[in-house]
Image (cartoon, grey):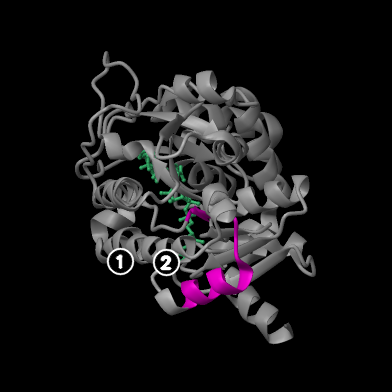
């Protein structure tokens, strides 16, 4: 038994691989292109662990994916690989089209060919789990009910449009070819190993450096936050017991306006590392909050109704926002080297060293 994980050197994929191998001896083949968002240093604790096989490469490289499937004969493929940052998708959408749409299509084709050739028992046990986002549903009004799985697709950014396209392809491969697929739609994740271009890690690392905490527009955009390890447990549960062809929303019922997130992080840092202890010339990190130009087409509110996953599969998150955000801030405080390497770009050099040594 083996899993093929794509994008397993990114934020969520890393957490998934680490959690998986902490609980199971089933090996993981980790295919990742190592874009700027892929960081093998996050997986350093698995060095020398034969259960983790890292393969640098693109999900759109059909020959490579075909050969991995043929050699390792996984019982499931979990597709985390994507371009994932909305702001980058606004500045340069091309990579999002290539990886999220074309890459997913090529992965589906390779998986379909592999799955078609399996013996009957392996064929019926096989799963392709596609990791998607709540952003495909678009933006909610203040009083609208949270997104359910039947909410219409209304993506607003090149990122969410490309994820929506990939979801449609996954769905079509189930309906047309019978490929045994599962799709998850999770809300905003936060936690360890999160690249500091996204809101929560950006706030933590900027505050510690004493530089501005940029709040887009009025800061009243609402996101629904889930601790990354709860997302990983949901994926494990859907893989284990999800109904074929179904989609599952994943969320923690934790809607918060951005400005509240900013205040919470400042307050936690004030408690854990008062500015004076870092020679910073203010009494509270809140002094760094700075309003900046809003994101074009900025979605106002996301909210996930996760009751299908709770009802059908008995999944519930382990963390509240208060416990998860405290763990997250503590993780960044305990891992200054990881942060420094990401900020300096040294994490990419680390990969060179790692391969040179291999
Ligand atoms: P990330 O940007 O941190 O990591 C993406 C990983 O995919 C990186 O390691 C990157 O090197 C790799 N990758 C990119 N293009 C590739 C390609 N063509 N072939 C192989 N590997 C490639 O993203 P993340 O936050 O870990 O998100 C993982 C998945 O979860 C994505 O599909 C994303 O849409 C989805 N998602 C993310 C969130 C969130 O809050 N971060 C929420 C819901 C869903
Ligand atoms: P982000 O972490 O980029 O995730 P997403 O856009 O996928 O929801 O942003 C979360 C929210 O925080 C979003 O409303 C944009 C906002 N934001 C800021 O206000 N300032 C920032 O510097 C960043 C990166 C995001």
Residue that badge 1 annotates: 98
The answer to whether mark 1 is within 8 Å of ligand 1 is yes
Q: Residues within 10 Å of mark 2 (few under 14, many from 20)?
A: few
Q: Residue furthest front?
A: 120
Of residues 287 and 328, the one drawn nearer to the viewer in this rendering: 328
Q: Residue furthest bottom?
A: 356
352 in relation to 149, above or below = below
Q: Residues within 10 Å of mark 1 (few under 14, many from 20)?
A: some
Task: Quadrant for residue 236, please give it.
Answer: top right
Q: Check if residue 140 falls in the magenta segment.
A: no
Specify the segment rendered in magenta: 64-80
The answer to whether mark 2 is within 8 Å of ligand 1 is no
1 in relation to 147, above or below = below
Q: Specify whether residue 129 is in view.
A: yes
- Relative to residue 346, is residue 175 drawn left or right? left
Of residues 165 and 112, the one drawn nearer to the viewer in this rendering: 112
- Relative to residue 95, is residue 112 drawn left or right? right
Residue that badge 2 annotates: 113
Which residue appears at 31% of the width and 60% of the height?
A: 96
State the quadrant of the C terminus: bottom right
Query: Is label 2 in a helix, a strand or a loop?
Result: helix
52 in relation to 140, above or below = below
């Amino acid at each position: 038994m083996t899993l093929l994980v794509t994008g397993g050197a990114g934020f969520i994929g890393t957490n998934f691989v680490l959690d998986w191998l902490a609980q199971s001896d089933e090996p993981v083949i980790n295919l990742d292109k190592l874009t700027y968002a892929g960081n093998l240093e996050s997986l350093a604790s698995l060095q020398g662990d034969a259960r983790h096989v890292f393969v640098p490469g693109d999900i759109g490289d059909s020959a490579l994916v075909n050969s991995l499937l043929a050699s390792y004969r996984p019982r499931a493929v979990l597709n985390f690989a994507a371009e994932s940052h909305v702001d980058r998708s606004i500045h340069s959408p091309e990579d999002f089209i290539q990886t999220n749409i074309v890459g997913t299509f090529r992965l589906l084709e390779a998986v379909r060919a592999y799955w078609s050739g399996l013996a009957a028992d392996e064929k019926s046990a096989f799963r392709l789990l596609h990791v998607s986002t709540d952003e495909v549903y678009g933006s909610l009004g203040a009083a609208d009910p949270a997104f359910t799985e039947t909410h219409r697709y209304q993506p607003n950014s090149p990122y969410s449009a490309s994820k929506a396209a990939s979801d449609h392809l996954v769905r079509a491969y189930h309906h047309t070819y019978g490929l045994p697929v599962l799709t998850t739609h999770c809300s905003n994740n936060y936690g360890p190993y999160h690249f500091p271009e996204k809101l929560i890690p950006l706030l933590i690392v900027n505050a510690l450096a004493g530089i501005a905490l940029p709040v887009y527009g009025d800061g009243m955009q609402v996101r629904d936050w889930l601790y990354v390890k709860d997302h990983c447990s949901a994926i494990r549960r859907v893989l284990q017991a999800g109904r074929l062809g179904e989609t599952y929303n994943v969320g923690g019922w934790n809607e918060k306006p951005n400005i509240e997130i900013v205040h919470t992080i400042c307050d936690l840092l004030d408690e854990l590392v008062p500015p004076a202890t870092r020679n910073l010339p203010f009494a509270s990190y809140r002094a760094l909050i700075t309003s900046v130009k809003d994101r074009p087409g900025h979605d106002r509110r996301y909210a996930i109704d996760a009751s299908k996953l709770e009802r059908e599969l008995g999944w519930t998150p382990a963390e509240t926002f208060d416990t998860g955000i405290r763990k997250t801030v503590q993780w960044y405080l305990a891992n200054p080297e990881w942060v420094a390497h990401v900020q300096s770009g040294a994490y990419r050099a680390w990969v060179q060293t790692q391969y040179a040594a291999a």
